[in-house]
């Protein structure tokens, strides 16, 4: 090896070491940040206490790692090589399936039955839903439980082979749909509907790079939802017309709404090719005689956004005071830009919010069935079935019994926590007895 080559290699090595450090300080080259929800480590403060505790050094190391020059590009390059060579995503939020189809891990686990609830818990939850439905019906409000289709269940053939469950695997979807129908809870289950459309509709109902129903699938679902509500509420919505053929989109940067929400998380140098998606062109007519825009309260997960992002179904077909309680927490005005009112559902007067509506819609997908409707059903149930003084006394006695059965360690190390857990268990057991 000649002296010139040695010097060249030494200079190249020094450049590789120094240029990222210079970029971190001067930012002489504009860098695009990484996609996703994460927090960059803050610069730690040097102090005697942090040096003694040994926390300053690892904190400084993490800060320098997070702020290294060209880090976003280097991360994308690493991710791209993993995706090309091994079809592996370097984020825990994405599973790569056949033909580059992307899935979320949570819905895959639910489809595998890994989050299965006890049958008694499902029966209790459904009986409480039935009680809430009846209480609202007596006040002129109709409740509808809507199950959105999970992508893993919709196209299991594109899951990696090792993630496909055996035929006949019991899941929460199976348990809940059987119990909801057996107890006559108003249900709109989109799983069999989408399974039928899969073989009869000409355009994709789920995007290759997205977790939610496609813009095309969401508008078909919205049409079906309106027809179901018309039958349930004995009313007619304003007319929605199709105007011309759907608009086909092939470019990734032209996809709308949630149609690319998983590809975006991969943080690749070159985004994977998108399956052409269709967007229906719709016209929304004003109400005519005999038609109405009813007020509704929607409580649901992220699938609910599809009913307002791709086409303004919720905005145009429902009254202006309609609201969406995202995961029963953040209160949103239905629109296409996630308009957060700044309010939280827990701070609103629940009775007024319910009884000023014509419909209450609970819209969830399979992997959120374990989440107890994010507390909504429990709140409404106790609004209309409050505990009496004898009830509270019975709960107190039951809580004392449960607390006495707790381990000595739990009672001594965290007595307040043990008391709170016993109280909640007593509360739930009492409600289960009342709903038998």
Image (cartoon, rainbow, N blue to C red):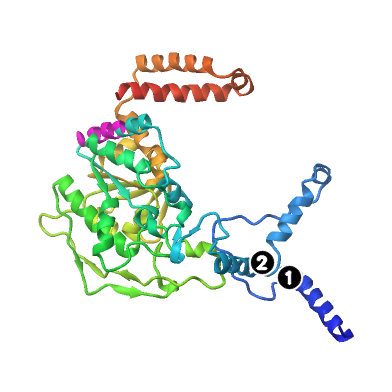
The picture places residue 372, in percent across and down from the top left corner, at: 39, 37
User: Gap between marks 1 and 2, in whole Å?
Assistant: 8 Å
Most distant residue in the left direction: 289
> What secondary structure is found at the residue carrying circle 2?
helix
The picture places residue 280, in percent across and down from the top left corner, at: 27, 69
The picture places residue 403, in percent across and down from the top left corner, at: 52, 17
Which image quadrant: the C terminus? top left
Q: Quadrant of residue 196?
A: bottom left
* Residue 131 part of the magenta-drawn span: yes
Seen at 27% across and 48% down, the residue is 189
Q: Is residue 10 shown above or below 376?
A: below
Numbered mark located on residue 20 in the image: 1
Numbered mark located on residue 71 in the image: 2
Q: Which residues are magenta?
A: 127-139
Q: Quadrant of residue 315?
A: bottom left
In-front residue for pair 353/53: 53
Q: Main secondary structure of the magenta part?
A: helix
Q: Is residue 316 visible?
A: no
Most distant residue in the right direction: 3
Left or right of 435 on screen, residue 234 = left
Q: Are marks 1 and 2 in contact (CB under 8 Å)?
A: yes
Q: Residues within 10 Å of mark 2 (few under 14, many from 20)?
A: some
Q: Which of the two labelled residues, at mark 1 and mark 2, occupies the earlier sequence position? A: 1
In-front residue for pair 357/113: 113
Q: Is residue 412 shown above or below 271?
A: above
Q: Residues within 10 Å of mark 1 (few under 14, many from 20)?
A: some
């Amino acid at each position: 090896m000649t002296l010139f080559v040695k010097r060249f290699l030494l200079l190249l090595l020094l450049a590789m070491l120094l240029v990222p450090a210079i970029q971190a300080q001067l930012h002489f080259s504009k860098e695009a940040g990484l996609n996703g929800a994460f927090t960059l480590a803050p610069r730690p403060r040097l102090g005697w206490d942090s040096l003694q505790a040994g926390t300053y050094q690892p904190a400084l190391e993490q800060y320098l790692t997070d702020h290294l020059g060209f880090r976003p590009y280097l991360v994308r390059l690493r991710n791209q090589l993993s995706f090309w060579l091994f079809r592996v995503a370097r984020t825990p939020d994405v599973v790569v399936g056949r033909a580059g189809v992307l899935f979320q891990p949570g819905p895959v686990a639910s489809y595998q039955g890994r989050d299965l609830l006890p049958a008694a818990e499902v029966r209790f939850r459904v009986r409480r839903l039935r009680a809430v439905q009846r209480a609202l019906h007596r006040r002129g409000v109709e409740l509808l439980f809507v199950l959105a289709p999970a992508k893993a269940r919709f196209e299991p053939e594109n899951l990696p082979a090792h993630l496909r469950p055996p035929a006949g695997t019991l899941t929460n979807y199976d348990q809940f749909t059987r119990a909801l129908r057996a107890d006559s809870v108003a249900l709109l289950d989109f799983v069999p509907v989408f399974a039928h459309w899969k073989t009869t509709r000409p355009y994709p109902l789920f995007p290759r790079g997205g977790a939610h129903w496609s813009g095309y699938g969401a508008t078909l679902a919205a049409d079906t939802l309106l027809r179901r509500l018309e039958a349930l509420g004995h009313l007619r919505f304003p007319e929605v017309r199709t105007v011309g053929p759907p608009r086909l989109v092939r470019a990734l940067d032209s996809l709308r709404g949630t149609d690319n929400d998983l590809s975006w998380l991969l943080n690749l140098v070159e985004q994977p090719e998108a399956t052409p998606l269709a967007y229906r062109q719709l016209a929304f007519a004003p109400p005519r005689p005999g038609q109405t825009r009813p007020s509704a309260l929607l409580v649901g997960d992220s699938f609910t956004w599809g009913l307002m992002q791709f086409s303004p179904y919720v905005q145009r077909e429902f009254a202006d005071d309609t609201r969406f309680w995202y995961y029963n927490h953040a209160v949103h005005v239905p629109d296409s830009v996630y308009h957060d009112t700044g309010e939280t559902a827990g701070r609103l007067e629940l009775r007024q919010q319910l009884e000023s509506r014509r419909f209450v819609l609970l819209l969830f997908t399979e992997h959120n069935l374990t989440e107890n409707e994010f507390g909504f059903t429990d709140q409404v149930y106790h609004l209309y079935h409050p505990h009496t003084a004898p009830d509270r006394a019975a709960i107190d006695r039951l809580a004392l019994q449960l607390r006495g059965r707790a381990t000595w360690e739990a009672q001594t190390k965290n007595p307040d926590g043990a008391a709170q857990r016993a109280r909640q268990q007593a509360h739930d057991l009492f409600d289960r007895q009342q709903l038998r």
